[in-house]
């Protein structure tokens, strides 16, 4: 009945012959005179989402999450990941080969310091680590009496005989009506920032920053419309853009040649070295620039200046066209999600629906608009215990039938030219237990607290993060992920530099779009998450206020399951917020819905009391 065009249900790590791969890696390390090797989930841009040719960690371990690192020694191997992926890592890896560590509780560098034998030689690929990350690893190795040694080419590339070819997705122009600012004007602003930083040039190592700067989009990475490449922007003179010429449409080539010198990626390292000669001060992004870039600059006589890429903040603060596009994309996307939720309520009592059925149906409803370019990530659709796996991805093997008495969590999003969406809803099949209602309501209270927050200009995400957790903490509960991440404009669904989390130190600025997604997860039973995207805006004036104040505008439009709410736990103000939100959802989406769905929405959004 429905089909998925933009996502599959194969498990790329399933059945991986990890034992012989680990053995082959150890043999290759021995040949190079190394006693171990670090394998991060990274490419030359430190990307979160990778093309198949860069999935070295998945190839070696079977673990397919977007965050993690392995260290392989002669006698043991470790896999480090964060709280989103601990359950997934245990399920996907061979416990006889890899011991799983929670990377937040026991970071890789701390483990190395405590466990590396004295005199060991530990290898790493300098293209897959930032300088900042390597400094921690080097310090840990020194404390253990071990040596950290750069090695090229990557030993995994030597033994990965059936490695996929690099991607060659087409590069297209991102229309000005969606971008809101032409690339020439952006380059002027970037050069001004380079001057402020007292640098002569900036290396753009983040493909998202490159896409934003030059108003281009690509298809090298699934669900993230970027092209992989580098750029060098000088304080004076033309920038250089390093993209494989086979990726460029004629239209894109003509437009880009008016802005920059187009060059092949193979010449990037040599050009960077030539630029750096003569003590040139070159700015490198501390988050995405590989240590190899700093080495090239230093060895050529230049001075690498590490720090935040100024483009990251420019990109995060959306302009009026991007904000208008986001509002329209969310209205369109909300209608698709509402059609799905109504369909789900009609079909699930039959007992025939599976998680894959739900994923296929939701993508199909999104495609009906004719404007969907891709999903913004592989849909998370977890029923019952699968919902407790924070970044669960359903496969043919894990696919469950959705049964009565279970919670069903679906986290999904769309890529449209006018905006990127990300939304999670948790719904009940049949009757919820009292515990489910309690936990859901506490998550909802945290979501509402964040949505209603009013905060001074300069407030960071770390300062706001407790708003989402207070009611969970009061019951001795919590969730092991951040409350919110930045979201791009027809770019990555995960965008820096701002986030709402314990580690979110960047101030939230008007125009930023972030997620608001508290949750609760009971291992082996169920998961709950309620996620909307929000826009940082100016707050209504407050009498006597001594500082400018900001608040959030909720962009996502979709009903929240009233059947899971325990009204006795809600305050009058919280109920008023929910009722007002549901009124807004109903009024905004009704014109886009068929009669049957509209009737369902009216019932789903009626006042709580």
Image (cartoon, rainbow, N blue to C red):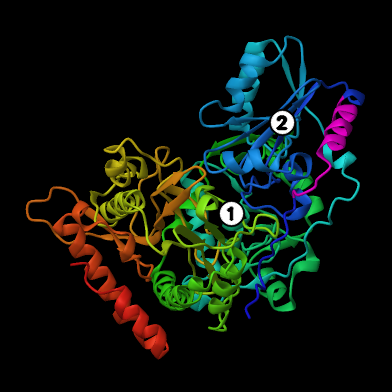
- Residue 236's tag is 1
Q: Which residue lies furthest to the left in this view?
A: 544
**Residue 289, visible in the rendered structure:** no
Q: What element carries label 2?
A: strand
* Left or right: residue 236 compared with residue 123: left
Q: Where is residue 561 in the image (x, y as percent from the top left)?
A: 35, 65
Asked if the magenta segment contains residue 14, the reply would be yes
- Residue 98's tag is 2
Q: Which residue lies furthest to the bottom in this view?
A: 595
* Left or right: residue 224 compared with residue 529: right
Q: Position of residue 491 (x, y in %)?
A: 55, 63
Q: Which of 382 and 271 is in front in this view?
A: 382
Q: Is mark 1 on a helix, strand or loop?
A: loop
Q: Which of 322 and 259 is in front in this view?
A: 322
Quarter of the rendering occupied by the N terminus: bottom right
Q: Give the range drawn in magenta.
A: 13-29
Q: Position of residue 177 (x, y in %)?
A: 49, 78
Asked if the magenta segment contains residue 487, the reply would be no
Nearest-to-viewer mark from 2 and 1: 2
* Left or right: residue 443 compared with residue 414: left
């Amino acid at each position: 009945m429905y089909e998925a065009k933009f996502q599959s249900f194969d498990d790329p790590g399933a059945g991986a012959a990890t034992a012989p791969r680990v053995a082959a890696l150890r043999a290759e390390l021995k040949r190079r005179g190394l006693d171990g090797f670090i394998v991060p989930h990274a490419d030359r841009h430190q990307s979160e989402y990778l093309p198949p040719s860069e999935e070295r960690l998945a190839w070696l371990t079977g673990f397919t999450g977007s965050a993690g690192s392995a260290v392989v020694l002669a006698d043991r191997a470790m896999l480090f990941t964060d709280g989103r992926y601990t359950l997934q890592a245990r399920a996907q890896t061979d416990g006889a080969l890899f011991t799983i560590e929670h990377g937040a509780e026991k970071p890789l560098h701390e483990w190395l310091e405590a466990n590396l034998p004295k005199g060991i030689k530990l290898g790493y690929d300098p293209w897959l680590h930032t300088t900042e990350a390597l400094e921690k690893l080097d310090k840990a190795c020194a404390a253990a009496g071990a040596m950290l040694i750069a090695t090229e080419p990557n030993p995994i590339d030597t033994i990965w005989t059936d490695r996929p070819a690099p991607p060659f997705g087409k590069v297209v122009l991102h229309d000005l009506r969606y971008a809101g600012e032409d690339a020439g004007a952006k380059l002027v602003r970037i050069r001004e920032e380079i001057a402020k930083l007292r640098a002569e040039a900036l290396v753009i190592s983040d493909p998202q920053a490159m896409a934003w700067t030059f108003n281009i989009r690509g298809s090298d990475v699934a669900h993230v419309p970027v092209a992989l490449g580098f750029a060098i922007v000088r304080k004076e003179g033309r920038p250089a853009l390093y993209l494989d010429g086979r990726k460029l449409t004629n239209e894109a080539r003509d437009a880009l040649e008016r802005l920059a010198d187009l060059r092949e990626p193979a010449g990037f390292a040599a050009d960077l070295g030539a630029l750096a000669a003569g003590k040139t001060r070159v700015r490198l992004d501390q988050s995405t620039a590989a240590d190899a870039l700093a080495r090239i600059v230093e060895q050529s006589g230049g001075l690498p200046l590490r720090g935040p890429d100024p483009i990251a903040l420019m990109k995060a603060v959306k302009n009026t066209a991007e904000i208008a596009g986001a509002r329209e994309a969310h209205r369109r996307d909300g209608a698709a999600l509402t059609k799905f939720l109504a369909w789900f309520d009609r079909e699930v009592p039959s007992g025939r629906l599976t998680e894959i059925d739900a994923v296929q149906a939701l993508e199909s409803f999104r495609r009906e608009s004719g404007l969907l370019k891709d999903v913004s990530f592989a849909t998370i659709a977890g029923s019952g215990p699968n919902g407790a796996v924070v970044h669960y991805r359903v496969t043919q093997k894990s696919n469950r039938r959705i049964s009565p008495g279970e919670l069903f969590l679906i986290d999904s999003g769309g890529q449209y030219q006018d905006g990127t969406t990300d939304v999670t809803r948790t719904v009940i099949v049949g009757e919820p237990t009292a515990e489910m209602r309690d936990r859901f309501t506490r998550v909802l209270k945290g979501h509402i607290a964040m949505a209603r927050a009013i905060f001074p200009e300069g407030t960071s995400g770390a300062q706001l993060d407790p708003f989402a957790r207070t009611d969970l903490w009061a019951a001795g509960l919590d969730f092991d992920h951040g409350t919110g991440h930045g979201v791009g404009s027809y770019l990555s669904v995960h965008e820096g530099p701002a986030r709402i989390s314990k580690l979110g130190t960047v101030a939230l600025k008007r125009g930023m779009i972030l997620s608001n997604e508290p949750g609760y997860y009971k291992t082996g039973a169920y998961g709950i998450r309620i996620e909307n995207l929000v826009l940082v805006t100016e707050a209504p004036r407050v009498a006597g206020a001594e500082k400018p104040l900001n608040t959030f505008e909720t962009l996502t439009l979709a009903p929240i399951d009233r059947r899971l709410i325990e009204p006795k736990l809600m305050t009058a103000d919280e109920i008023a917020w929910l009722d007002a939100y549901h009124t807004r959802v109903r009024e905004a989406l009704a014109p886009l819905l068929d009669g049957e769905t509209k009737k369902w929405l009216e019932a789903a959004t009626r006042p709580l009391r």
